[in-house]
Amino acid sequence: MPDLPPMLPIPDVLAEHVAAHLAAARGMTALLPAVEAAADLLIDTFTRGGTLYTMGNGGSAADAQHLTGELIGHYKRDRRPLPTVTLTTDATVMTCIANDYAYDDVFARQVRALARPGDVVAAFTTSGNSPNVVSALEAAQANGAVTVLFGGGDGGAAVKHADHLLLAPSSETPRIQEIHTLMLHMISEKVDAWAAA
């Protein structure tokens, strides 16, 4: 049996998580203009009657739903609901497309059916290389929608099809997801204040 690396004591492991989180959060300062631009994009989209479509796989699907919940429900203020749809939440459509076509098509087919010029399609992905996310962003651009990528590191293959980049300053999946939550809360703050005014 090969030698395994020694395990760190639990408090050291947890402290490493905190230190890595703080380092990623500090890196957010440089991204504030991009986050504000994404919030302004959504405000402009909703002002003109457009819709936001969100998507992701696994934990990123949860982040996509989180943003939708903040916009249809509310973040901090009682205000009108904003038109946002998460493409992972219809199990019938997802499984139909995956079964009849391929899992790589589960988002792109929905985007081709729904997204139009004046809409925004936002993808959450920690790797940026999920084929179903990359093809959906490509389909969104082909339909004339504006695309936003919530990614990390160098953004992977999805960068090629992203009009707006929100790349967490980390290459570690947990840190990227934590920063995505921070970003979506920051965006929700500005959009929420606008919608409540």
Image: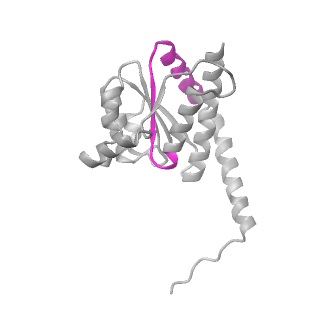
Q: In this view, does 66 lie to the left or right of 130?
A: right
In the image, the segment drawn in magenta is 33-60
* Residue 191 included in the magenta stretch of the image: no
Above or below, 158 relative to 77:
below
User: By what rule are the colours in the image chosen?
Assistant: one colour
Quadrant of the rendered image containing residue 36: top right
* Residue 44 included in the magenta stretch of the image: yes
Quadrant of the rendered image containing residue 34: top right
x and y percentages locating residue 111 in the rendered image = 34, 32
Looking at the image, which residue is at 65% across and 16% down? Answer: 196
Looking at the image, which residue is at 36% across and 26% down? Answer: 115
- Taking depth in this image into account, of 165 and 140 the one nearest to the observer is 140
Q: In this view, does 21 lie to the left or right of 168?
A: right
- Taking depth in this image into account, of 125 and 193 the one nearest to the observer is 193
x and y percentages locating residue 193 in the rendered image = 66, 19
What secondary structure is the stretch in magenta mostly built from? helix
Q: As drawn, which residue projects farthest toward the front?
A: 92
Q: As drawn, which residue projects farthest toward the left?
A: 100
Q: In this view, does 102 lie to the left or right of 37?
A: left
Above or below, 16 relative to 69:
below
x and y percentages locating residue 189 in the rendered image = 65, 26
Which quadrant is the C terminus positioned in? top right
x and y percentages locating residue 75 in the rendered image = 65, 28
Would you say residue 176 is visible in this rendering? yes
Quadrant of the rendered image containing residue 66: top right
Above or below, 176 relative to 68:
below
- Taking depth in this image into account, of 91 and 37 the one nearest to the observer is 91
Looking at the image, which residue is at 38% across and 24% down? Answer: 145
